[in-house]
Every structure is written in structure tokens, then in C-alpha cells.
Amino acid sequence: MKKLFALVVAVAFGLVAVGQEIPKIALILATGGLGDRSFNDQSYWGAERAAQELAARYGVSVDDVFSYVEPRSIADYEAFQNQFARTGEYTIIVCIGFDQAPVLAEVAPEYPDQKFVVIDAVADAPNVASIVFNDWEEAFLCGVVAGMMTKTGRVGVEGGMDIPLIHRFVQGFTQGAMWANPEISEDDVMVRYVGAWNNPTLGKELALEMYQAGADIIYGAAGKSHLGVFAAAEENPDWWAIGTDVDQAWSAPEHADVIIASGLKRVDLAVYTEIMKAVEGTWTPGIISYGMVSDTGIGTGVAVGRQDIGDYISASYSEVEIPGAVMWKVVQAVFGILDGSIVIEHE
């Protein structure tokens, strides 16, 4: 009798679970698509992590809860945003990249019951959570590493686009290099813009131009394009590179011999968190900042050296030995940012 009762209860709960509405996630990636081993890939990892947890919770496949698209151009954004929203099936629609924001600000009000998230920008609509990052913090820490390790006294930054978002990376990196090495001036920091997020061939050409002009370390902030920086650095044993957003010595292991550090920007964490908040009923619209000095206190840092140090310095998969003096300078920079003695100017 007890077994029969237990079976009835189990079946009843199973029917309840089957009757529950299964959450669905939509992800619209930034132009450049997957394969950048950085920004877009991180966004996908965060959404995939949430999808895997939800699929296990509801006893369905990941494909049942997760859909994503890779726009080829900015012109594709509006169609994809509308396409997902008009179905009314998605618990949340996540839009990746600053250039989706203007489009989303127009589209979102047409679907007032639909929750949207935009990453790396602000879309002014009552049903959008706008996630922004203190990019200048990760860039400053990368600049500290470059300033301490350069042998020529000249370093470089390769940006994807000549836009305010990337200007903040340039500003942070430049200030970090100058703070760590007083002999470096703004004139010693070369800057090139690829003009695209998905052109590693041109990224390599521009990096070689800077290396040949005297830079021995280049920081890439250009999505898939700055994979070309790593390829260029491989051509000379005296050239090094710095990655961004994720430990690129891990995500691009074939270049772990030239990548000395990487800025960390936890896009994956932000995407995952916003999705789970929507599912759990705790999601709210508005502007949410991620970073060392921010609403959340998390989201930026640097991957450098062999061990984790606190919340903002993570061990890197780099094969390059980082001197103790460099690590100590990075630790000092972290404390300075946190206590306000270092103020990073940014647009």
C-alpha cells in the first residue's frame, strides 16, 4: 500500500512538472559571431550554462530552452529582435553588443510584456535591463602589466572600432601603463582601430605595423579581429600580447606562449545572472553596472601569473613567467582602485 501511495505521489508530482511552463532563452549575438574566443563566446557560454541548468531542472533538452542567432550585420538586429519577441515564447531575450541598444530602444516598447537584456550598452525602455561594465578597470590592470614588462618603453592598443566604448579601453590601458612606469608617456602608447570585429587579417597587419614601430606589447580589444595581434606576436620572440574579456591564453592556447595577461570582463556571469533572475522572478529593468567599483562589485579584473590573488586577479594559462615585481604592482593597483587612491579617467 505504501509503495502504491508513493507511486501515485511521484506520478502526481511528475504531472505537475510536465504541466509547468518551461522557460525559454533567446540570444542575439553581436556581429562577428562565435569564434572570437572572447566577448561573443563568453556571452554564449553564460547563456548555455543557464540553458543546461534549466534543461536539467525541467527534464528537457538544451535545444528546447535555448535559441541563438549570429547576425551578419547591424541591419539584422531589428529583424531578429522582432522575430523572437513576437512569438511571446521567450522568458528573456538577451542582446549582445553596444550597437544593438539603439534598435532595442525602438523595438522593446512594442512588446511591453517581454523582458530584454542588452549587454555593454544602455537602451532606454521600461522592459530592458542594460548591463554596463567598468571596462577601464580591466584595461588599467592590463596597462600596469604592459608598463612593467615592456623593454622598449613603447606599447600599443588595437581596438575594434573608433567609438567611446573602445576609447575607455584605450584610456584605461594608457593610464595603467603610465602609472606603473613613469617613463612612459601618452606618446609611447600607439593606438590602431581595425574598423571591424571580425577581421583578424587586418588585425595582424595593424599589429605588425605597431610592433615594427617599436611597440613590444600590444593589448587587443577588437573581438575576433585582435586574434591577429596574437598571430603577429608569434613572429618575433621579443613581442608579447595581452588579451581581453577572458583569459585568452586559455581560450586561444596556441598563443599561450605570447599572451602575458588578459583583461577580465565577466560577460558570461552577467548573461547567466540576468537569465536566472528572469526565470526565478527577481529580474528588474534598468541600468546595472559590473566592475570592481560598481553596483555588483564583480565583473572586471585581470588574468596574470600562476595563482589567484583575491577577487580580481586570476591565474592565467600563459606560458610566460611573470616576475614577482609585476605581480606586486598589479596587487597595488587593485588596492588603489578599490580604495579610491587610483581614479581612472574615462569618457
Image (spheres, helix red, strand yellow):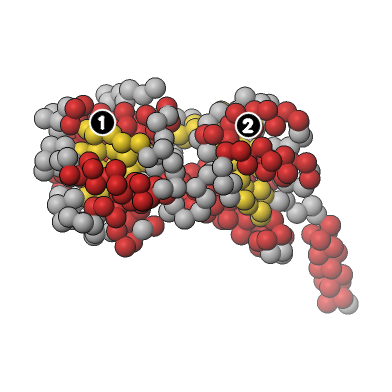
Whether residue 250 sits left or right of residue 277 in the image: it is: left
Q: Secondary structure at mark 1?
A: helix
Mark whose residue sits in front, 1 or 2: 2
- Residue 156: horizontal and vertical position, in percent? 24, 38
Front one among 172 and 105: 105
- Mark 2: amino acid: Val
Q: Position of residue 54 (x, y in %)?
A: 66, 56
> Is 13 left or right of 184, judged from the image as shown?
right
The percent coordinates of residue 14 (x first, y second) are 81, 64
- Indicate which disc residue 114 carries: none
Q: Earlier in the sequence, mark 1 or mark 2?
A: 2
- Image quarter in which the C terminus is found: top left
Determine whether the residue tagged by mark 2 lies in a helix, strand or loop. helix
Density class for disc 1 (Cα within 10 Å; few <14, some 14-19, many ≥20) is: many
User: Label 1, label 2: how many angstroms apart (C-alpha)?
Assistant: 32 Å
Residue linked to disc 2: 103
Residue 290 appears at what percent x and percent y?
47, 35
Numbered badge on residue 174: 1
Q: Nearer the viewer, residue 204 or 176?
A: 204
Image point (81%, 68%), residue name: 10
